Each structure stands twice: as C-alpha cells, then as structure tokens.
Image (tube, rainbow, N blue to C red):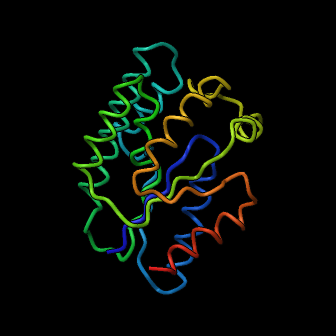
Amino acid sequence: MRFIVIDGLDASGKDTQARIVQERYQRRGERVIVRSHPAEDNWLGRMAKAALLGRGKINHLKASIFYALDVLRSLGKYYNRKCDTLIMVRYLMGTAYLPSPLDRLAYRFFRILLPSSRFMFFLDVTPEECLRRIGGREIREAFENYEAIVRVRKKALALASDGWHVINADLPVEKVAAAIEKILDSR
C-alpha cells in the first residue's frame, strides 16, 4: 500500500491536492482512500471541528485531542486495508497548533507512534496568501488570524524539517500538483 500524507496550514490547498493525487491513481485503476481531518463521518471529527470554531484555551485543547483521536481512528480503520493508496490529509502538523513546548513533544510522540512515509508533503503558504484565501470564508476557525498563522507556520516549518517535502503552495494549483507528482514519480 502506498501511504501519502498531505499536510499544511489552513487554506494551503491540502484537500485540492489530495483530490488531484487521488484522481491520478484512480485513472490507473487503483483503489484510493482519502481521509481528511477533522472528518465529518464520525463524532471525533465533528467534535474537533466544533472545538475549532470555539474560542479560548479549553476549545483549543479539545480540538487538539479530538483531532488526534480522529487521525488515530482513520489509521485504525483504513491503514493497510484493501486499497492501493491511502492519502491522509492533515496528519501530524496539527501538533504545531499546540502551545510550545507541547507542540514538539506531541509531534515527536506521534512521529514515533504513527506510520510514516517517504511521501509526506507539507504545503507551505505565506501568511498573506493564507489570509487572502481565507478571506472569502463565512466562518473562521480559531487560528485563522495573522498572528496565529505566523506563529503556527514557523513551528510547522521547523517540524517539517524532519523528513517532509516542503512545497511552495503560494504557487498556482497546477504547479503545486506538478511538484508533488515529480516527487511521487521519483521513488
């Protein structure tokens, strides 16, 4: 089974790129499963999403806990199951939203515990581009403001130095897809 991780900050194009990768392998006749977190098909994901829409430290903590449990649920249900490719959207970088030093501790813990891949992509988007993309949304999540984006991006990029392919997601969708495809084809 091919295991692909597509992660990044809000509005970096994770779901768009996951769909492009999914279609690529489906055209080849492969069975592909995409799990995007927080998932709406289970109560853990719904609880994580609800907490993300709330304010305050308690909601941030609840969002992180339910998010992690949602990812673990997806792994238990879909990893090494009957598919050729499993694509996980929002996987480990959710730990960057935790306060320091908990972010690094949680990342290291989950990096050891969870399956890894040579196809782990971090879609990096500048705070300005992120806010431009978020601007059209009716509802904003707790971390969708300039200061939080700058802080979380810095932490996420530091974490991504641990074996991730960092892709410039400020580029047009097609160029981001081409960069991902080149890496997928190189292995």
User: Would you place residue 77 above or below residue 151 in this image?
Assistant: below
Q: Looking at this rendering, what residue extends furthest in the bottom direction?
A: 28
The residue lying at 59 percent from left, 40 percent from top is 10
Q: Nearer the viewer, residue 125 or 49?
A: 125
User: Would you place residue 72 above or below residue 167 in this image?
Assistant: above
**Residue 12 as seen in the image, left or right of residue 82:** right
Image coordinates of residue 24 in percent, x first then y, are 56, 77
The C terminus appears in which quarter of the rendering?
bottom left
Q: Nearer the viewer, residue 87 or 119?
A: 119
Image coordinates of residue 182 in percent, x first then y, are 58, 76
The residue lying at 40 percent from left, 36 percent from top is 95
**Residue 107 as seen in the image, left or right of residue 172:** left
Q: Quadrant of residue 117?
A: bottom left
Image coordinates of residue 19 in percent, x first then y, are 57, 64
The N terminus appears in which quarter of the rendering?
bottom left
How many marks do you count on the picture? Answer: 0
The residue lying at 61 percent from left, 31 percent from top is 149
User: Would you place residue 41 above or below residue 172 in this image?
Assistant: above
Q: Quadrant of residue 105?
A: top left
The residue lying at 40 percent from left, 24 percent from top is 100
Image coordinates of residue 27 in percent, x first then y, are 55, 83
User: Would you place residue 2 above or below residue 104 in this image?
Assistant: below
Q: Nearer the viewer, residue 185 or 25?
A: 185
